[in-house]
Amino acid sequence: MQKKTLSAIVAVLAMAVLVVAGFYFKKTRGTAGAGAAVSAAFDLTSEAGDLPDGWYVSSYENAYEAFGDGAGVLTLSSHIADDLRLCKKITVEESARYVFSAQISTEGVEEGRGASLSIDNYSLDKSCVYSDSLYGDNDFTETNLYFETKPGQTEVVLALRLGGYSEASSGTVRFKDVSLRSGAADEGRYQVLEAWGGSDDEDEDDAFRDEEHYKSFFAVIVWAAVLSGILLIFGVYRNRRLLTGKTLPDRTYWSGFAFVVVVGLLLRLILCALYRGHDSDMGCFIGWGQDVARNGTRQFYWAAGHDWYDYPPGYMLFLGGYSALLNLFSVDTGAVFGIFLYMLPAIAADLCLALLLMNFARRQGINNSGALILGGLVFLNPALLFLTGAWGQIDSILTVWLVVSFLLLLDRKPGTVDRNRILSGAVFGLAVMTKWQALMFGPMYAVAHLFLVRWGEKEAWDDVRDTVLSALAAVAVILLISLPFKGDQGLFWFVDRFMTASAHYDYATVEAYNYFAFCGANWKRAGEYILPGLLTYKQFGTVAICLAILCGFLTVLRRYQAEKRLGATLAGDRGFLFLAASLTMALIFTFGHYMHERYVVPILVMLLFAYAHYKDKRLLLVALLFTVTTFLNEMMAQYVVSNGAMDVVRGGREHNTVLRFWAGAEVLVCLYFGYVVVDMLHDLKGKLGLVLRREEDASPSRLYDFIEEGLRK
């Protein structure tokens, strides 16, 4: 039986390798027609100070200049960061390749997307592509944008651009010799005008034009979060003993879990049908996956207009293979079911997290009923339901890799070499290659390795060796995954890509309910001052992040000292890493800069792991409170950046009031969490290493009597 199983696994892996190898370095295929023979140079002459006929300005800010010099040179200028566009709508052939060209010069162009050529079809079909960008000072430089229309696309909006969506830039840029012509099959790397968020439904758009409707739906979101809070706090938390006190046979236990899974999948499918994923994120995932599947990996990050591709290569590699698989079945990515299939990997990650937590809880002595409730708190968690079912984001996949890495690190396998510790490093490397945010958990991961070494004992050398091998395993996985995308770049090309990605959103906070949002700094530049002339948001956030890491370090140190007093090692505590990592990330999210609403998601799950080990009811309460604030934060973030609602709701009185109120609530939850951890560490049971698992029905006198008796012995 084992041989058959092994043979099946080998066969599946072989098929996977063949599928992935097929598109690793695949060159662009000439699938689209050449289209009509087009060769048109645009007449940019006009009266000095005016714009040529047919061209119009689109801008987020009002402090800009846009004019022609009368001799065919157009100038765009903004002294503040802006997405400034000079646009012209034209008719094109469907399923055709085109080259959009211009001579571009720049003066003092900084930040964001820079100066570029763009096809800005977001208002038509939610697609948008860019050429290579220019920054700083440049003489007139020939710039080309290679794009490919899809079936049914007969109009495009040409854009001469300073900045980009969520990538605002400042400076002065000039354009001349602007033209559009048909492109040859192998002339360049053509970007397909894929919709960022599926197809539009004009009837639905018309139904959502009314301003009062937007504001009414805004209120529905708030009440949905309030009702979820009531359900979680008064339905689950207040009745936890009643819910977890039941004895369930294994058959009933798994039947109950099957019911949870069915309900969770149905709810996610309904949310997918209602929201169709985030406007831009789902379109990016689908577009990226199709790009890798069609063109391979070698030039994926380096082709024209791809400098904003900011997710790590691990997830891009998976998207390419997954898209190639879906293409075999001709999946319609604009239909609800097609979008749901792209959400499915993150939904599967939710399911994995539920199973991991349930298994962990049972190993910590929690009965079947309690383990089932914890599994339901993951797979039916409102924040995770919305994130993977309505939004389509992948933070659950990141959380799976982090949790698996932590569990392997905490599950020591004595021997010549601790294979679990080495495998833990490899999985952590996979987490980094899935989302850069995994690096925020790196310090606590390193601290755990440090304190798991049995210093002063003969096994210390073995622990140091295993730690080094674990770090090497993480680096090896990162390098191995990054190699197919390296192209002509250096071996560590991804470091620069990470730095570029972190600078794309140079804001104090981006729709994240935290301290900066409470201070009214939502979408404010990180370089602006929180204390006028003294301290910027970025400086404040940097100090806060360092202090958060210090708090996590002290948490592990106190747990280590408590175990040493008992003559034990920290390896016997399977909850300390989840507790310390949750606290550190909660503090970073609440007081750090560059935060997005989703960065708090791993905390929701890790807190439940910590609760399963320590059985401190306050950890459960904190997890549920974070769930409520995150649920509202996610719903609001997606809503206020969607088409239409952005103009009506975002930045308005109602939005600002709700944002600051709930951001203040999140800050209070974080501070309460800090208090709980401090109280746990200073509590008498904490000083004894928490060897007595807190039973919620045990009286303090019985616990202290038992402790004193143990000390006398």
Image (cartoon, helix red, strand yellow):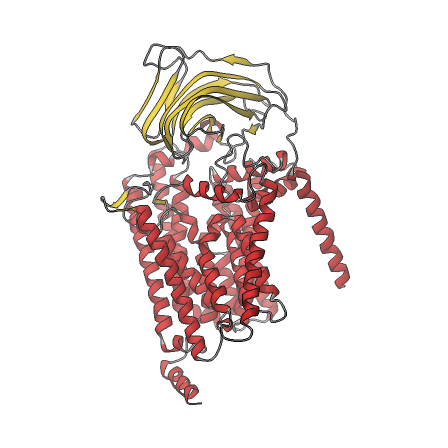
Q: Nearer the viewer, residue 53 or 228?
A: 53
| Residue 329 in sight in this render | no
Q: Quadrant of residue 230?
A: bottom left
Residue drawn at x 45%, y 43% as measured from the top left: 499
Q: Nearer the viewer, residue 240 or 570?
A: 570
Looking at the figure, which quarter contains the C terminus?
A: bottom left
| Residue 632 in sight in this render | yes
Image spot of residue 464 (x, y percent): 54, 66
Q: Quadrant of residue 607?
A: bottom left
Decide if residue 573 is on the left or right side of residue 221.
Answer: right
Instruction: Establish if 207 lies above or below 258.
Output: above
Decide if residue 679 is on the left or right side of residue 198.
Answer: left
Residue drawn at x 30%, y 53% as measured from the top left: 664
Residue lying at the far left of the rendered structure: 532
Image spot of residue 196 (x, y percent): 50, 35
Instruction: Establish if 291 lies above or below 557.
Output: above
Q: Nearer the viewer, residue 454 or 657?
A: 454
Image spot of residue 450 (x, y percent): 48, 65
Q: How many marks?
A: 0
Looking at the figure, which quarter contains the N terminus?
A: bottom right
Image spot of residue 406 (x, y percent): 52, 62
Decide if residue 382 is on the left or right side of residue 292.
Answer: left
Q: Nearer the viewer, residue 704 or 591?
A: 591
Decide if residue 640 is on the left or right side of residue 8.
Answer: left
Residue drawn at x 57%, y 65% as measured from the top left: 465
Residue drawn at x 68%, y 42% as measured from the top left: 21
Instruction: Establish if 597 lies above or below 464.
Output: above
